Image (cartoon, rainbow, N blue to C red):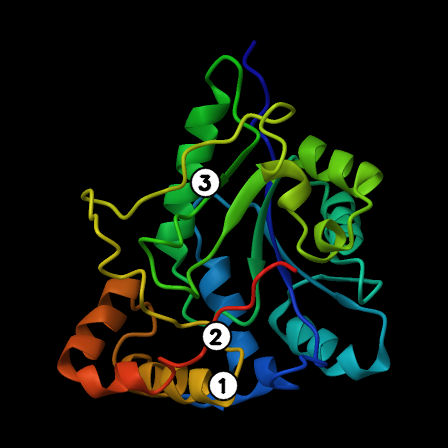
Amino acid sequence: MTAARPRIVAISQARMTSTRLPGKVLLEAAGKPLLVHHLERLRRTPGLDAVMLATTVNATDDPLVACAGALGVPVFRGDEQDVLGRFAGAAALAGADIVVRVTSDCPLIDPDLIGALVAAFLKGREETPPIDYRSIDVTLHPRGLDAEILTRAALDEAARLATDPDEREHVTPYVYRRPDRFRLGVPLAPAGGSHGGSHGGYRWCVDEAADYDLVRRLLERLYPVNPRFGWQDCCKILAEHPDWMDINRSIRQKTLH
């Protein structure tokens, strides 16, 4: 008798009160809010059983609940500061065995890339001992394609034991900071063995107005022609418009404290 296939759920975090660009996930591009682009792309990921939005109990986030609800995406609401607790609650509500973590300020997220991460993780689960965590290599891929995958058991242990504020806010540090406790898979590199960080300097997440300007241009150029465009299509557009790279070049990625 074979073991039952694990239930794999992608959980995306969102809130309206971003410090640098409030309400950013509901800004529009190509006729839709960025959150809609994000969730629609996420739902096309091969290997997922469900997608869920994790937001806060604040009334300011009611529009996010309405937006997700219109798409049929279930929502879990929890404490604004305890994002780890939110993820654990969402995973429990969804009955997840394995959790894919993404953030909703990544409207260009690539379903096939996340699908490759899921497949690589499942393969790693067949090893002895099985891996507990894996991520997309953000030094070789553009920022804004970020995704992590971990077992529900690892997530629950982190939610139960983590006390560091960074570990509560950023969800996964409790796991990847403890290689003695959890088996960490090698970060997923681009298909074909691309090296040298040739795409690692691209920035497609939306933290500031300049980020939105770039992402809006990419969506308005690509989405009307092919709603299922991939991240390499974005690279081709930037190769045609190298000046677009300067739009948000000066913005620095927010790091752990």
Image quarter of the C terminus: bottom right
**Which residue lies under the disc numbered 3?**
118
Q: Amino acid at mark 3?
A: Val
Whether residue 72 sits left or right of residue 141 in the image: it is right
**Measured along the vertical axis of the image, is residue 56 above or below residue 43?**
below
Whether residue 56 sits left or right of residue 230 in the image: it is right
**Which residue lies under the disc numbered 1?**
32
* Residue 243 rendering spot, x and y as whole percentages: 22, 87
Q: Amino acid at mark 1?
A: Lys
**Measured along the vertical axis of the image, is residue 155 above or below residue 85?**
above
Query: 44 or 15: which is nearer to us?
Result: 15
**Measured along the vertical axis of the image, is residue 99 above or below residue 207?**
above
* Residue 49 rendering spot, x and y as whole percentages: 56, 45
Task: Point out the tag, 1 or 3, that comes first from the N-terminus.
Answer: 1
Query: 108 or 243: which is nearer to us?
Result: 243
* Residue 97 rendering spot, x and y as whole percentages: 65, 35
Residue at the farthest left position: 240
**Disc 3 packing (10 Å; few <14; some 14–19; many ≥20):** many
Q: Is the C-beta separation of discs 2 and 1 under 8 Å?
A: yes
